[in-house]
Image (cartoon, rainbow, N blue to C red):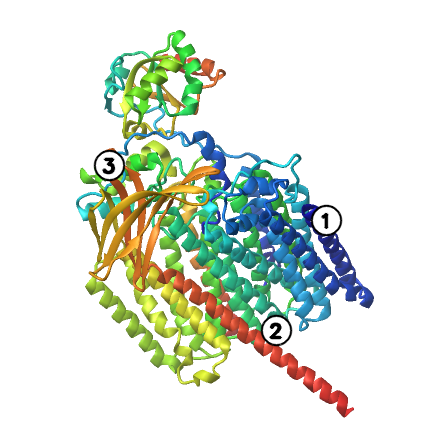
Amino acid sequence: MTRWKLWLPLVLFAGFCALVAWPLIRPPSTDVHSQLIGKPLPQFALKPANSTLPGIATADFRDGKPRLLNVFASWCVPCAAEAPQLGELQRQGVEIVGIDLRDHPEDLAQFLQQNGNPFARIGADDIGAVQLGIGSSGVPETFVIDGKGVIRYQHIGDIRAEDVPMLLGKLKDAEA
Amino acid sequence: MIAELGLAALWLAAALALLQLVCGVMVVRRDDAALASVIRPLAVVQGALAALAFGALLLCFARFDLSVKLVAMNSRDAQPLIFQIAGTWGNHEGSMLMWVTIMSLAGALIALIERRVPERTMIATLATQAFVGLGFYAFLLIASNPFERLDPPAQQGLGLNPALQDIGLAYHPPTLYFGYVGLSVAFSFAVGALITRQVTPAFARAMRPWVLGAWIFLTLGITAGSYWAYYELGWGGWWFWDPTENASLMPWLAATALLHSVSVLAARDALRTWTIMLGVVAFSMSMVGTFLVRSGILTSVHAFAIDPERGAFILGLLALYVGSALVLFALRAGTVAEGERFAVTSREGALVVNNVVLCALLAIVLVGTLYPLVTEAYGVRVSVGPPYFTPVSALFFLPMLVVLAVGPLLRWRRDSLERIQRPLVLFFAIAVIALAGVWFNSSIGFLPLVGMALAAMLAVASFAPAQGRNLRRLPLAVWGMMIAHFGIAVALFGMAADSAFTVEKLVAAKEGDTVEIGPWLATLKTVEPVAGPNWTALEATLAVSYEGEPGKALRPQQRSFWAPAQKTSESALLTRWNGQLYTVLGDQAEDGRWQLRLWWKPFVTWIWYGGILIGLGGLLALIGRVGNDLKRRHAQVRIARRKRTAE
Amino acid sequence: MRLLLAFLALALAAPVIAQDSMPDAPYAYKQLEDPAQEAKAKALMETLRCLTCQGQSIADSDAKIAGDMRHQVRTRIKAGESPEAIRRWLMERYGDYISYKPELSETTWPLFALPLVLVLAGGLVLFGRFRRRA
């Protein structure tokens, strides 16, 4: 056997070590990002989640005005945690549309009463069909939709106070 | 007090390991008979101390000592005693202590009994074993002290993860660890032989029982784990190509290759460097497996004790041991003389093909498992799962079975296929008849079809080596080989039958409803609450009967544990010789009906029967080999004594 | 090998344990009436990854989102869509991650090259070994 071949196992092993050391040093994110960024929202229509607010349909997003699409549920703890930030965004004039995932109307009413209601419309997604349709994999998630109904940005997890200016910026970009 | 005693024993054992290493290195560099004579006793005492430390931890768990942090974190008073005790290794620290204990006990055992290899090689081997052990002692003492105290003691324990509160915990991890760690002995032997350049048949014969033993445990551990996952996860799957499963499969593949190549080395003095390489690879795969499972860099259903920092420690140890062994290999392997030559059509030739294919399988599993990490470096997330692993590994595995059928019939060194023409024609005929028979009677997929045909062929072929020989005088090792190969046929048949014939029924049933599933009728009688020692459950009673035979009752449960609060679903299984009925109780719908999941899985149990047969074959071979060795030693002693009296 | 389904489950489950109490999607736990369609759906489900689980297919998971995905798969198969079209529909939304069946692409070609390389390398090893002999 030639000499260089004997070093081959060591080289392969070094490659293995480098490969696995990388994610140890910088743990990769476990988020699953929607691949629909830059693409139009798929066609859907959701019935109103409660009696006071209208439901949602794709056409509602094509009036030229950017808005946020928030996937949430009353049973989701981080959703309550991000409620103040959503309220803040609403006060700054942002229109927020909600997708209420697998929820009972009574629970939703109580959730809105406790945490405030920043939503202009809320559609009820009882079987996760729209959630899957827009490439969302959990709650809460927030999408920036531009005035033509195109998905411009996806925020995974709850909105922290420091995310508010970032989202305002993304909405501004979406106007262009 | 007990915890402190355990910790002290652990420190002492570590110190002795260091001493063993230093003495070993000195003796290997410059012969020193006095120093050499202390190394074996050192290894023995070190093993005893490690066992003492593990015993102390066991006692802490058995006595439910809440002032020990590990006990408080992983145990609770209402747990049945068996889980109380098995909880010792149901966590990171305890399982690492178990690892190091097995490792030093193995070291002690070779120090006690192994006398065939040249003493210098033996000392290099023991030094290597101490070197490897030392890293794990350091890991325990620095980063994962199992004996850490809580002051003040906890009022109550947190409890063992309910998913682990199963009899599987009592036997699966220890079995697998015996296998993983047993391979460390093969590693040490390989390194020892490289250091002293003594790669001889005697060395192979010394190493073989250790490889065999580790391999038996690995086989049984994987079999047990597969069955545990099968009944615990509640969806009837028994192998998911999940990273944790692959982590245990890789050392098994390497050990299987090693087992066969070491036989060639022992019998024919061929494949010297190759065997050394496999010895290094097999234990590397054990450590890679442990690293992958515990570092959490790959997501797994069976994720265990995940901690990236500890992962880094294990990776450091891995890099140190495997890296230095491979450097040594690169420097020394060129100086190991090439062994005996042989022809393609020979027993060795078949075994080489077997080794190449097993290594290819190992490469596929390793690359497929790690591949998501490669793409993640580019920011792309991919999943590699059963649709990749199953066909690609079958591509290599199924052709290998043909070699497996023929190989044992060939003679060493040089043979011709004409000589064994008749059995070959027979094997071929069986495969074709089985293929046609299954094909005409059912419409099943390509892989299960080929799998069944090859299983039928192999079932006969595995016993062909006994043809024309006196069964009573056939060596145990040959019996072992035949039974292990037969076990592969049995397991393969189970796998093929499960994937081809499983019937699934998901139904919503109210009490009194009857469901038909394959040849079974199942009636939901009642759903009632029941209470266990640390859980409450909803229990369904199903009356089931097979083709009108007298009925039996099955009781699947939905269990709610309260410490920690977690729900598990406990499947209920009914086993017949020709398969298993698998039942799971789901949620109650709003209309009051219960979700039931039922599977009729023909011959699924043959998968694990096959696994047990493979292990049993290994055991017979081990008994045969060790018995022969003892006889030979006995004879040598007698001859020596006779010589002395003659003088 | 289900070596111990342990701590992660515990550590992660605690904060996100909140689960809804809504009934499951109709086809989450219900099979299609046509056995041939159900077999197709089942085969597809075994190759799709559950988004929130730790490495399970949607055919092996009790997670709600897995149930929702099974519902999508079954209703789409029922409506006559082909399994591969459904896989593409999901991959357009979640990327390659959602499918356990890697597709041949710029990023995955080494996976498909590997068996060929191994066959060649194995062949070379055997050839080299035995040619010298003969």
The numbered mark at residue B592 is 3
First-in-chain label (1 vs 3) = 1
Residue A166 placement, left or right of B425: right
Q: Around disc 3, counting alpha carbons within 10 Å, would you say few (fewer than 14), some (14 to 19), or many (20 or more)?
A: few
* Circle 1: residue type: Ala
First-in-chain label (2 vs 1) = 1
Label 2 marks which chain's residue? B
Residue B259 point in image, percent of width and height = 53, 66
The numbered mark at residue B8 is 1
Residue B643 placement, left or right of C45: right
B242, above or below C93, in the image: below
Task: Give how far apart the Cα atoms at labels 1 and 3 are.
Answer: 60 Å
Q: Nearer the viewer, mark 2 or mark 3?
A: 3
* Circle 3: residue type: Gly
* Circle 2: residue type: Pro
Residue at the location (60% across, 51% down)?
Answer: B58
User: What SS does tag 2 mark?
Assistant: helix
The answer to whether one can see residue C91 in this image is yes
A105, above or below B569, in the image: above
Q: Quadrant of residue B282?
A: bottom right
User: What SS does tag 1 mark?
Assistant: helix
Q: Nearer the viewer, mark 2 or mark 1?
A: 1
The numbered mark at residue B201 is 2
Residues at marks 1 and 3 touching, judged by CB atoms closer than 8 Å: no
Label 3 marks which chain's residue? B
Residue B39 placement, left or right of A145: right
Q: Around disc 1, counting alpha carbons within 10 Å, would you say few (fewer than 14), some (14 to 19), or many (20 or more)?
A: some
User: What SS does tag 3 mark?
Assistant: loop
